[in-house]
Image (cartoon, rainbow, N blue to C red):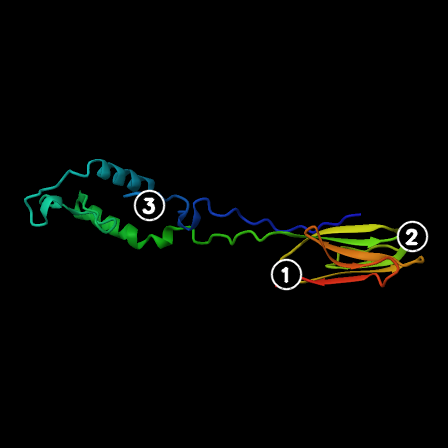
Amino acid sequence: MAVGLSVPALSDPLPYGPDTCVNGFVWREARSGDTVCVTPATRDQIAAQNANSGANKDPSQASGPQSCSQGYVWREAFDGDTVCVTPAVRSATLADNAAAASRRATNSPEPTPEANTVVFEVTGPGEVFNIVTDPDGGFVPDHTQLPFTRTMNLSPDVHLLQVVATGRNDPGPGCRIILNGKVVAQEPIGGNAHCIFTMPD
């Protein structure tokens, strides 16, 4: 006889970690490791600018070899970004930088806690008047034959495990609590048939 408690399913962790973009946005990739989230069109535009990074430059200007031609400015997607673009493109790039945090899927789920599985056992010959488990797994009727087993998946808020059995025959039943495959509480046949275990914090 086995009873299982359902555990709510949790979402999978974000596929690209904490820098995963919300739906509709992608990493900009103005350089390796640039995970600012932008529209796909902006990323394509950035890639085209990078592919032609020597365009719109005028080394004779005051800033040296990386100086931009008249009417162009450094893009400044990151410190040291000297790709030359129009002022409007730079303004859009800086706006993307400012909006970076708002475009990340920051509501990432916590890592799924490791599920705990408990097995309550009542051992011995004969029958019982009743068996009670904590957490409650449902009514166990009089004259239930031994041995008895109940398996449960534990929710994170469970802190106390116990099983109590009242036998109909001599010797009385024993009990055992097995948590994640390890015996954590046990009473022999003929004992008090009350097993209890407190979950560690």
Quick one: 81 or 20, which is closer to the camera?
A: 81
Residue 44 at x, y percent in the picture:
29, 38
- Which of these two is toward me, 177 or 44? 177
How far across and down, in percent of the image, does residue 186 sit? 78, 58
Q: Earlier in the sequence, mark 3 or mark 2?
A: 3
Residue at label 3?
A: 33
Residue occupying the far right of the picture: 170
Residue at the spot 46% in from the left edge and 54% down from the top edge: 107
Q: Quadrant of residue 178?
A: bottom right
First in sequence, mark 2 or 1: give its number.
2
Q: Identify the element where label 3 is drawn.
A: loop
The C terminus - image quarter: bottom right
Q: Are marks 2 and 1 in contact (CB under 8 Å)?
A: no
Q: Which residue is mark 2?
A: 126
**Mark 2: amino acid:** Gly
Furthest-left residue in view? Answer: 60
- Image location of residue 125, percent across then percent down: 90, 52
Locate residue 179 relative to residue 88 in the image: left or right: right
Label 1: which residue? 157
Q: Which mark is residue 30?
A: none
How far apart are the two marked residues, 3 and 1, measured between alpha carbons? 40 Å
Question: For residue 156, which quarter of the picture?
Answer: bottom right
Q: Regarding mark 2 in the picture, which secondary structure is present there?
A: loop
Residue 66 vs 141, above or below: the answer is above
Given the image, on which type of amino acid does mark 1 rest? Asp
